[in-house]
Amino acid sequence: MIDLNEKTTILVLGLLLVCSVAMASTVRLMPDGDGAYSDWYRTRNCAADWQCIDEYPVSTSDYVFANSFGKISTYTFANMFNATSIDNVKLCFYGARYDSSHRFVRFGFRLNNTDYFDTTFSLPTTYGLICIVYENNPATNQPWQYGEVNNAEAGMNTNLPKAGAKIAQMYLEADYS
Ligand SMILES: [Ca+2]
Ligand SMILES: [Ca+2]
């Protein structure tokens, strides 16, 4: 039922799939500056907000925090180099609830001066790492381009009831080939 050309096509597609899986890499992009918003507070042992959350591996001795409605902070991140294909971008943060009555946070991106805070979490009592996977750029609903990743800000807001958290680390990870 499958003619030779179709078999060849299937074989080539299979090899391409194997090659792309084999060549996929991951780059981690740490914060390198404060973004458009900086409403969250920082512990006194870091000179700027972003310097509380930019270390890897994580240190919880410095962090940013908020425990009231309407606080937004975003950060800029180190750039990645030219990648032909980006499979996904993960927004990762190491966080804990502020206290039992301040535990919800909304995470997301700021892209081209527009906010996309679309993922809400109830954070755990003790610190934990959570990564949100964005297969597409939320501004375009298309696969990410590396220039879009480089220009992205990401962060969090407390624009919901019972909001509050401590964030000790944040970074982006891109799977690319
Ligand atoms: Ca950047
Ligand atoms: Ca920290």
Image: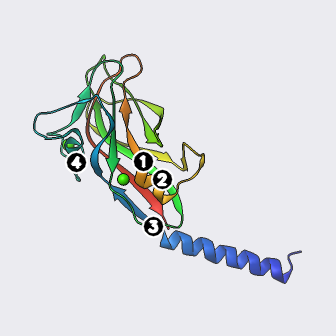
**Residue at image coords 33%, 51%:** 77
User: Is 149 in front, or is 164?
Assistant: 149
Question: For residue 130, what is the image quadrant?
Answer: top left
Q: Residues within 10 Å of mark 2 (few under 14, many from 20)?
A: some
What type is the residue that disc 2 sits on? Glu
In 3D space, how far apart are the residues under numbered discs 3 and 2 (Cα atoms)? 11 Å
In 3D space, how far apart are the residues under numbered discs 4 and 3 (Cα atoms)? 27 Å
In 3D space, how far apart are the residues under numbered discs 4 and 1 (Cα atoms)? 22 Å
Q: In which quadrant of the rendered image does the N terminus lie?
A: bottom right
The disc at residue 152 is: 1
Sequence-wise, which precedes: disc 3 or disc 1?
Answer: 3
Sequence-wise, which precedes: disc 4 or disc 3?
Answer: 4
Residue corresponding to mark 2 = 148
**Closer to viewer: mark 4 or mark 3:** 3
What type is the residue that disc 1 sits on? Ala
Q: Disc 2, disc 1: CB below 8 Å?
A: yes
Residue corresponding to mark 4 = 58
What type is the residue that disc 4 sits on? Val
Q: Is mark 4 within 8 Å of ligand 2?
A: yes
User: Is 123 in front, or is 50?
Assistant: 50
Disc 2 is placed on an element classified as helix
What type is the residue that disc 3 sits on? Asn
Name of the residue lying farthest toward the left? 45
In 3D space, how far apart are the residues under numbered discs 3 and 1 (Cα atoms)? 15 Å
Q: Is mark 1 within 8 Å of ligand 1?
A: yes
Where 21 falls versus 77 (above or below)?
A: below
Residue corresponding to mark 3 = 82
Sequence-wise, which precedes: disc 2 or disc 4?
Answer: 4
Q: Is mark 2 within 8 Å of ligand 1?
A: no
In x, y percent, where is residue 38? Answer: 29, 33
Residue 138 relative to residue 67: left or right: right
